[in-house]
Image (tube, helix red, strand yellow):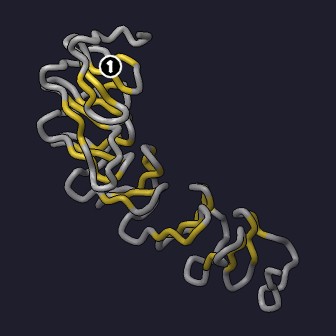
Amino acid sequence: NKTGADPETLKILNEEIFIDKNAAYFQGKKIKGSDPATFKVITNKEKINIYSSDKNNVYIYNRKIKGADPVTFEVLDVPYSKDKNSVYFFFFFVYGADIGTFEILDENYSKDKDHVYNFDDRLNGIDSATFEILGNLYTKDKNNVYYNNGRIFGADVRSFVFITGTEYAKDRDNIYYFGKKLPKVDVGSFEVL
């Protein structure tokens, strides 16, 4: 057996995870420091079983989530999770996230009462109360419009809209493609063919 697991005490927990008398394993790789006597799989509403814990630690895949509390840990929506102290993105700590107001917006963005996050990165200077996801990496708040987290200088926040199903967006004066203003394009007659 390539894993080094003890075949006499091997117990399969699911299609990804098993334990023996010495350790727990994820996809055949030993989870270092795991306690097989208290080891359990943590399931979530999507039934994605990549999280586990024992009396000492919480794990994602075969990696320890440093500092995660096994007693209060819960999966929010893969890959986000939280415990009494922190919010996590996979095994990364989401710096500064407020646990009580943290919410997942989509696969790229989340926010709390004070900040907006792209995965585990806090985006400074964005107003979380008015933050909107427009589509295809276009977002905005009450002050600015952004493409891929970079500010689109000169874009009109009030009239800015994403053109669904394309890479284009527009405001009252300009057309934007991948976040860049297209020169000399008439907004009134512009069509995506």
State the residue lying farthest toward the front.
8
Q: Position of residue 104 (x, y in %)?
A: 36, 59
Residue 95 visible? The answer is no
Q: How many marks?
A: 1
The residue shown at (72%, 62%) is: 178
What residue do we see at 41% from left, 10% from top? 1
Q: Position of residue 92 (x, y in %)?
A: 38, 35
In front of the other: 120 or 171: 120
Please tell me which residue lies in front, 76 or 37. Answer: 37
**Residue 58, above or below 30:** below
Query: For the residue labelled by badge 1, is the local secondary structure a helix, a strand or a loop?
Result: strand
Three-letter residue code for mark 1: Ile
- Using the rendered view, name the quadrant where residue 113 is placed: bottom left
> Which image quadrant is residue 168 in?
bottom right
> How many residues crowd around disc 1 within 10 Å: few (fewer than 14), some, or many (20 or more)?
many
- The C terminus lies in quadrant: bottom right
Q: Residue furthest bottom?
A: 188
Q: Looking at the picture, how far across and down is residue 164, in whole percent?
A: 64, 77
Relative to residue 140, is residue 101 depicted above or below? above
**Residue displayed at 18% across by 26% down:** 39
Q: Which residue is mark 1?
A: 31
**Residue 141 seen anywhere in this rendered image of the structure:** yes
Q: Residue at x 23, y 50 (%)?
A: 99
Above or below: residue 18 compared with residue 4: below
Residue 41, image quadrant: top left
